[in-house]
Amino acid sequence: MSSRTADIDFTFAHELTVRASIRALAATGWALEDPLSFMVNDDDLYDWRTTTRDHTQDVLAILDAPENANHHVAVCIYHGKASTGGQLLFFPGRMTCSFIPTINRRRLPDSVEFTDLSWYMHTLVPPLLTVGLKSYEACDIGH
């Protein structure tokens, strides 16, 4: 069986904070995963850390801190009603981010391999428009 990689890359009209994106995505049912998983790539190791959701404000402050603006940062988000989620990866400069469906990836109804990217776009794009989404690109690649 082949493996697949899927992601949606977002480009914004201005710099975006992690906090603003999480707040916008909450409008369509997205929330930080519990336990809260996050990453600051300040050493090229992409080390993920986990904490409880009662530390949400501290984690968002770390991810949005000026000293981390030139590093990749990420957080896992989850859609409770749909039982799916993934990684929201922010690139240095915070003008772009990617969503990678890694938690119970939704698949197309007639395919056991292809990702239902349209479902993810339907729930991610509208709220991100409210925070300056300029364009997106989605892909699902078999290896």
Image: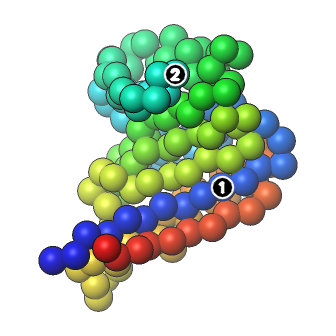
- Disc 1 and disc 2: Cα gap in Å? 22 Å
Badge 1 element: strand
Does the image show residue 57? no
Residue that protrudes farthest toward the left in the picture: 1
Say which label, 1 or 2, has the lower sequence index.
1
Q: Residues within 10 Å of mark 2 (few under 14, many from 20)?
A: some
Quadrant where the N terminus is found in the figure: bottom left
* 136 with respect to 1 (left or right): right
Give the residue drawn at x 49%, y 17%: 59
Residue 62 vs residue 82, the one in the foreground: 62
Residue under circle 1? 10
Mark linked to residue 42 = 2
Residue that protrudes farthest toward the front in the picture: 44
Give the residue drawn at x 67%, y 63%: 136
Disc 2 marks a residue whose amino acid type is: Asp
Disc 1 marks a residue whose amino acid type is: Phe
Residue 8 position, x and y percent, is: 55, 61
* 135 with respect to 103 (left or right): right
Picture quadrant where residue 122 is located: bottom right
Quadrant where the C terminus is found in the figure: bottom left
Residue 119 position, x and y percent, is: 47, 69
Mark linked to residue 54 = none
Give the residue drawn at x 79%, y 58%: 134
Badge 2 element: loop
* 11 with respect to 137 (left or right): right
Picture quadrant where residue 49 is located: top left
Residue 52 position, x and y percent, is: 33, 17
Q: Give the number of marks.
A: 2
Does the image show residue 4? yes
123 up-or-down from 89: above or below = below
